[in-house]
Structures are given as C-alpha cells and as structure tokens.
Amino acid sequence: MAHGDSGRRADAVPRMTDVARAAGVSLGTVSNAVNHPDRVAPGTLQRIRRVIDEMGFVRNATAQSLAAGTSSVVGFVVLNLANTIFLDMSSGAQASAAKAGLSLLLANSDMDVVRQSTYLDLFAEQPAAGLLFAPMPHLFSGMERIRQRGMPVVLLNARPPEQSQCAVVANDEDGGYQAARHLIEQGCRRLAFVGYIDSWPPLHERYLGAVRAVNETAGAVQLELIPTREVRTEDGAAVGRQLVERKPERRPDGIIAGADLVAVGIIGAVLGSSDLRFPSDLAIIGYDDNRASWNAQIPLSTMAQPGLEMGRIAADLLLEEILQPESHVHRLVVLEPHLVVRDSSSRRPV
Amino acid sequence: MAHGDSGRRADAVPRMTDVARAAGVSLGTVSNAVNHPDRVAPGTLQRIRRVIDEMGFVRNATAQSLAAGTSSVVGFVVLNLANTIFLDMSSGAQASAAKAGLSLLLANSDMDVVRQSTYLDLFAEQPAAGLLFAPMPHLFSGMERIRQRGMPVVLLNARPPEQSQCAVVANDEDGGYQAARHLIEQGCRRLAFVGYIDSWPPLHERYLGAVRAVNETAGAVQLELIPTREVRTEDGAAVGRQLVERKPERRPDGIIAGADLVAVGIIGAVLGSSDLRFPSDLAIIGYDDNRASWNAQIPLSTMAQPGLEMGRIAADLLLEEILQPESHVHRLVVLEPHLVVRDSSSRRPV
DNA sequence: TTGAAAGCGTTACCAA
DNA sequence: TTGGTAACGCTTTCAA
C-alpha cells in the first residue's frame, strides 16, 4: 500500500481525536458522547454530534473492541449453506442476534474440513462476542481453542463432546423412525436406508430410528443398509444404478435416503435406466426438506427440520451466555422433525 | 456455569508479552517470530515456537489490525443467499480470497434494505481488507461511507453509480434477448414479460432485451409487460391466476419470467386452476437457474448466470485493488448468461 | 460535567 | 539478530 501520494485516503479518515479538537472538547468527552450520552451536558452533546456528522466520523470498531474487550459480531461457521436447512438456521439466528443489537457474520465451510478449521482459527484470533457452529458432525477440532479463549460457542446439529456447552439438535433418531413408519404404512416391506453413517452421527441416528421402526414389525418388514461415501446427488445416482440391476425380488420397495440430494440422485438414475415407477414400484423419502432438491423429477417426500427455530434458539442460548455468563446454565435443546408427504412416497391419493 | 472458580477464562488467555517472558526474549522478537520468521535466529525462533505451542498462544487479530492497519477479512454483503446464484458467487469469491490468504465472511441482507444498510455500517466500522457488495440494485446508500474510509468495494450484479469502482455484472439485456428469441423459435407469438422492472435495473435490462428480440420480428410477435410488486413465488402465482381468467386469444403463449421463482409461481397457479399445458399451450422460461426452484412442477427452462465465475472475478478485482492500489485500474466486467432449455419451454423433443 | 492519562495487545521503527 | 518504545484509536478510571 503506497503512501507517498498526499492525503486522500486513510489519512483523511477522522478519528475521535479530530472530533474532539474540532468540537473543542477532550477525547474522553467525545467517547462519552458516543457511548454514554447521559454523562454529557446536553449542549456539549449536541455540539459533538454536529461535528461528528459534519466530519463523517465513524468509530473504529477494531480500536473499540481492543479497548473495551467486546465485540458486536456473532460468527456462524456453517457446514453447508447450499443445504437450505442451514440457510434457515442462519435466518433464525440473524433475527435473534439483531434483536440484541448484534450482527451475524456467516462463514461457509461447505463440507470442507480445511475450510472449517480455517474459519475456526479466524474466529479464535478475531474476538467475536460468540460463535454459532454447525460442524462436520464428527470434527470439532479447533473449537476447544476458541472456548479456552473465553468465547462462548453453541453447537448446531451436533451434540457437544461433553455437557460443557449449549447445543441445538433435531431428533434424528425419531426422524428416521417416522420416515420408516411412513413407508411401512404405505405398504413397503423391504426397506433400504441409503447414506453415509460411519462417522456422521446424525445419519447414524436416522438409521437407528429406522431400525427401531422395523423391529417393531416383528419380522414383517426387512431393512437393508446401503452405505454411500458421502451424501451427494452422485452417491444417490450410483445406488440407483445398482438397484436397477438387481433382481426384482431382491430390490427394496421403500427407500429412506439419508439426505434429499441422495434421493434426487436415486430417482434420476432409476427413472433414467428402468421402467420402475415411483412410488408404486419404489417409494422413497428424503431428509432435510432441502429446497435445493430442485431437479427431483418427482416431488419428494421428506423429513423436514425446523431450521429457523433451531437457529433462533441457538442464538438465544448464545446471547444468554454472552450477556449473563454467571447465571447461564448449559442446555441441550432437542427439536422434533416432521414428516412432509409428497408424491415420491404416497401410494394413496393425497 | 458459575464463575467464582479461579482463573480459567479470559484471564488465562496468553498474550505476546507472556510468551516473551516465558521464552526469555523481548516482545518485539516474538512479534517478529510470528510475522517475519526470517528476521529471527533459528534457535530463538524454535524456542519461541515451542513456548507458543505450550501456552496455546493465539495472536489477537483485533490488536494486530489496529497496530498494522490491515485485516485479513474480506466481507461480502449479499442480496439473497436463498437464490443459489448468489451462493455460487460466494463460493467463487471464497476460492479467490483463500488463494490470497484472506477469509470471506458473508452478510446476508436477504432483500431487506435495513439489514443491508446495517451490514454496510458494520463493515464501515469494522475495517476489513475490502468488501464485495451485491446490493439491492437501486440502493447503494451507505457504500460511499465505506469507500471514503479508503476501503475498496467491488459491486456484483449492479453497475456502479460512477466509473470510480470495479463491478462484475451479467449481461441482462442479452439474457432477456436470448430468452425471448428462444420462445419465438419455439413458435410463440404473444410473449409476456413478468417482473418488477421499475427500480430494479437488472430486470429492466432483461425486459429491454426481450423488447429488442420482439422488435426484430417486425410485428410478427407481440410483447406484453406484466408488472409485479416483487419477484417472489407469490407474485408469480398472482399473475398465473390472472392469466387463467383471460380469454384464450388474449392470453400470451410464451412467458419470460424475471426470476425463476416467479416462473414457479406461475406454473403452479396455472396448473392448479386450468387445463392449460406447458409448454404446448404456454411456454415459459425463468431466470437465474436458481436451485431453489425446487417445487417447479415442470422442469424449468432458464437463463443461467455464471455465478461462480462472477464471484471469482469480483474477488480478484478486489484483491488487486487491495494489494496494488497504485497500479489498479477500475474495470467493469460483463459476463454472458446462457440459455438452459428444459421441459417448460421446449416444444420439440429434447 | 469535563479533562488527563493509563491501558487494550499488537506492529514497526530505531538503536544497540 | 535483538530489545526498547512509540504508535494504532479507543475506553475507562480518577481527579479536577
């Protein structure tokens, strides 16, 4: 950044000192005028404010954070904004934060471990008032460093490793159960759960819920697990192609996809390479109610999560921890998902 | 969580001074070890680094920004993350920024003037290295204050009021033209453009492009403008209901929707309350290739914008302005949209 | 009610 | 190569 050329830049940015000089008062008084107007005589206040307007003074938040040791920013390190459930969370959080006069800044880790950890490091350095964190469900590394610095962190969509912090999650086990029950009620007898459950707790929970529903049928219904590498459309497409190859009697008649995009992939592959029909030959239900499942060729049934409310509650918990650290008690809030029936699973006219 | 219990919080956060003392060197040397390792003797460096690790020291970015007058954060105040075109822009921008070692933080104004201006104020106070800004197309107020502070701002999806800054836009006029041409080629003769064009330049441009395409037909094709209040699904639904009421000969046979969601609304309303068929009775094309047009009942043709590239280029322009302010020359980059044909407009088998 | 001055945790300069 | 020290722009005591 070249200096040299005369003052037409940063040099021209007025500081509080400049305001003070122009208003003929001291620095401290200007600071008070800005932060504690009640401590300043009405006349002085008015004069200072006029000068501030005239000079276009804007206080430097960096300096103010450093001096006061506070910040008006809340960060949200978020797994994947392309999944609208997370966008909903951010809307809810932003609404709550705004009420408290705080601004929400989003950091999209986009399912990338490196990016997630980079953003965590950023917020560890850049003191914010607090952090919302929707992590890779099995990877929290880096979060502890932030908490050690005294910065409150609330988890979204992941249970905390210990009970030493707040978290908001959806009941995935129950979601899996509901999804399976629904398919069973539609007449499905050979279910398959498609997804990546190994180190992805939410999906694992959903699978366990499906297992429970199937167990309740005392053998009348079977459940198969079809693992995928991740939960993207391509993973679903691969499964779809594989299903088409199977002999009819070995093919599931009801599929619970771990995520909407997986379902979209399955539907696309099956319709593209067979005469099988949804939902008559094969019923399918996704998970998340992701508005990005735009290219579903059949309106997709799904388990919807209350993203907006999750975000709102998480931000409220965070705010409480920021504002009343002594009286704050850590909580785990579990919200219920709900079934959304569309064409892909409904064998009865809706 | 009670406090009371002895220092295990903010008090415990180690500062450079603490590192210096523990390593038996001076403060300045630690700073050098962190920022200019080459200026420090290998042995000393190693010792300092060990101490840093042991103490879990993380440098305070607030203090560092204040002292150095720089920041490693780039902000992106973005119109509407629910429209995936903007999410694509953010991905492109984040990729470019990361290459330069900067972090991208998103502020979603969500089509709200107040929120947009709040976020602009935030970045005016909170000095960032630079700002990307996808504004309400007619509302830049607040941006000047930031630029006056010497902070570079690159506009996305909006032309700058003067040529005094960089911007990246898509060629909306041409997009409108292409969309109209496509419908005309499909055999449409009575076109309608649906959208909010009054103070929304991009949509106005698209409309003008459609006008140009129609004018080229020397009267063979007509174009009607159907204005809406905004460009949401509901606006489209209202138009759809109104179209159904019209006498067939007064009904358009080809619709250019100003945005995908508007098209989705129209399709839903028309299918829901008439026997009209897409695309045979009514062809329709949207704009943006928004992955959130999930509930389209017919795969939607659209004009896709190169969001990722727009974001990447915008960030590159910003970085250039940040890193080489003297040699930097402001530019307006115009990218071309491209036609994506799907079922909603294609009267020939694809 | 106001002013003066001591920080906040770094960076960057100049001497040593 | 290192140490000492003056900024950076603000907040916050403490006196006046």
Image (spheres, coloured by chain):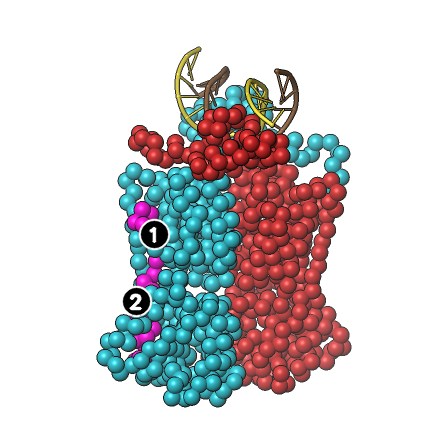
Chain colours: A red, B cyan, C yellow, D brown
Along the polypeptide, which appears first: circle 2 or circle 1?
Answer: 1
Quarter location, residue B137? bottom left
Question: Along the horizontal axis of the image, is A74 left or right of A274?
Answer: right
Query: Label 2: which residue?
Result: B174
Q: Do circles 2 and 1 both sit on a common chain?
A: yes
Which of the pair A70/A208 is nearer the observer? A70
Question: Along the horizontal axis of the image, is B183 left or right of A191?
Answer: left
Which of the pair B213/B295 is nearer the observer? B213
Q: Position of residue A199 (x, y in %)?
A: 61, 57
Per the image, is B179 magenta?
A: yes
Residue D7, above or below B259: above
Q: Amino acid at mark 2?
A: Asp
Chain of the residue that carries numbered disc 2 in the rendered image: B
Q: Position of residue B94 (x, y in %)?
A: 44, 51
Which of the pair B126/B101 is nearer the observer? B126
Residue A90 shows up from this direction: yes
Residue A205, above or below A149: below
- The range drawn in magenta is B161-186
Q: Residue at x 34, y 31 (%)?
A: A7
Q: Nearer the viewer, mark 2 or mark 1?
A: 1
Helix, strand or loop status at disc 2 = helix
Q: Residue at x 72, y 80 (%)?
A: A220
Query: Label 1: which residue?
Result: B161
> Which image quarter holds the N terminus of chain A?
top left
> Which image quarter holds the C terminus of chain A?
bottom right
Q: Amino acid at mark 1?
A: Pro
Q: CA distance from mark 2 to mark 1?
A: 21 Å
